[in-house]
Image (cartoon, rainbow, N blue to C red):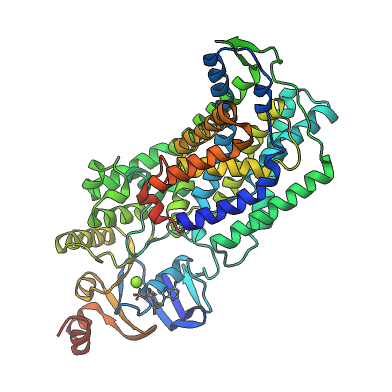
Amino acid sequence: MLVIKGLNAAYDNIRVLKDVSIKVPKGKVVSIIGANGAGKSTLLKAISGLMQIKKGSILYKEKDIVGMTANRIVGLGISQVPEGRQIFAHLSVLDNIHLGAYLYFKRNNRLEITERVHRIYEIFPILETRSKQIAGTLSGGEQQMLAIARALMARPELLLLDEPSMGIAPLVVREIFNVIEMLNESGTTVLLVEQNARAALKVADYSYVLESGEIVMEGLAGELLDNPKVKEVYLGG
Amino acid sequence: MPKLLSAVYTILVINAIKLSAAFCGELCLINSMEKITVTGQIFQYLITGLTVGSIYAMVAVGFNIIYNVTEIINFAQGEFVMLGGLIMVFFYAVVKLPLIVAFPATVILVTLVGILLDRLAIRPIRHPSVLTLIIATIAASILIKGAAMLIWGKDPYDLPAFSGRDAITVFGAVIQPQYFWVIGFLIIVVIALSIFFDRTIIGKAMSACADNPDAASLVGINVQQMILLSFALSAAIGAVAGITITPISLMEYDRGAMLAVKGFGAAILGGLGSFPGAVVGGLIMGTIESLGAGLISSGYKDAFALIVLLVVLFFKPSGIMGSIEISRIKRF
Ligand SMILES: Nc1ncnc2c1ncn2[C@@H]1O[C@H](COP(=O)(O)OP(=O)(O)O)[C@@H](O)[C@H]1O
Ligand SMILES: [Mg+2]
């Protein structure tokens, strides 16, 4: 579904991604693990169109999306949940959810939108009870759920998740990863980026290890879990 | 933030001080009135103050719309008001359109100027910082003022009042019907804007751009388009302010800077970014100015409002209705 070849990206001439090539097959969960500063967020931003690319190609359904603006890429079926729960802090929870379906409001289908909101409330019941609250006043875990909910409102075929476990209580992390599995079972392809390697490898089918902007290892997630090097560096021995 | 704001404000004030002597507006009218009771006089100052304040409030609302989407202070905001007045004069006196046709035609033309401002001065700047963009609006305002001088010359122009000039006398105060039009348009603008920002998805999308432009584009919002819309909207509101005030205080090419000072002052007084704040700030600025000029001395007219502004900012740096949390989040 997504094929990235020889991707290079830089901030002001400091190379952050060096010839990164990955594949995300349809219906799978692929994870990218790596330490802080490895370039994981940059990779996701390159896919979603927030980051300019120097060299390489990003094929989504056989179509090169390099150079397309972020607001057009969403329309193709790729939604990104940005790192650090970048919700619209001054708007209400429901407004945040509605804005997730921004592109579909234009086609004037109220019923469809209401139906999508109901589906979101089934997945994250807490958001229904908080629907009128200002999003910035939610707890960290709730904000992460809201960020995911907002991305789901566009009904993406490919969901990009940037460190959904960051700064969240373990119990909530489990809940969020359960949702990721559930979404995948119902047909959404997922590309998950995580420092929390153990959680990421458990939920993923296939995994890549990113170090200083380079893919240094890849394999089935189960195999990487048993790999001595991965164990030592990313799973705490 | 308060430091940068006061720097910006100083530039505006210096720009406008030359004009303050010339800008006397309808307040001179009051000074020529005699023999009315003290309550009547105070009532008169209040009504005049609220009318002028309504214009300041509209200018402040215009500042806020653009600021909320882009964090830019648009120095050309006052020029929209000036253009509103003078283009209306052109459509009415030269093209001879009836007022009711000239009004929307003027609003549309000034809106186009707002769109051009975004397209020609804001969007072409690569890697913009908020400060470069603000400087671009200063340049644009100088250009617009120069163009207006070439087109209309330096004379002030008048327009007929919308429903005549037969003043009504209430408690001894003389009220021109045009005052009601000005205050009425402020009410319409505020109601329309609150519906737009609270009830429509486009309005919400504009607020989303202000909160987090990257996240906004990730849900499919075209941020550039929203910025364009914010310039168009503020230009339209500026035009309405200019059209409605011209029958009261006339309009000439260089009025923009002064209006920008007062409107910007009103916006900070109320809390930059807050619409209720803009209205309250504008009305307070107008009323204090009018009372101060009438009761103390009209020579210091512009000083009164500025003193109040400084005092309020000293005690509450985020303005009357501004929230400290929000001002911390903003870069400017
Ligand atoms: N906006 C930016 N400007 C300059 N350098 C950046 C920027 N964002 C990230 N970087 C640098 O790029 C590298 C990779 O960052 P990032 O992709 O955020 O890593 P990760 O998500 O894996 O923690 C880091 O060295 C970081 O300092
Ligand atoms: Mg990151």
The residue depicted at 47 percent of the width and 52 percent of the height is: B209
Residue A11 versus residue A120 in the image, above or below? below
Q: Is residue A225 visible?
A: yes
Closer to us: A156 or B92: B92
Q: Is residue B79 visible?
A: no
Q: Horizontally, is A129 left or right of A217 in the view?
A: left
Closer to us: B39 or B84: B39
Q: Horizontally, is A26 left or right of A48 in the view?
A: left
Closer to us: A106 or B9: B9
Residue B9 versus residue B294 in the image, above or below? below
Residue B223 versus residue A18 in the image, above or below? above
What is the quadrant of the C terminus of chain A in the image? bottom left
What is the quadrant of the N terminus of chain A in the image? bottom left
The residue depicted at 49 percent of the width and 42 percent of the height is: B309
Q: Whole-percent x and y of residue A189?
A: 34, 64
Q: Horizontally, is A174 left or right of B26 in the view?
A: left
Q: Horizontally, is A48 left or right of A146 in the view?
A: right
Quarter of the image where one finds residue A188: bottom left
Q: Whole-percent x and y of residue B303?
A: 57, 40
Q: Whole-percent x and y of residue A234?
A: 22, 81
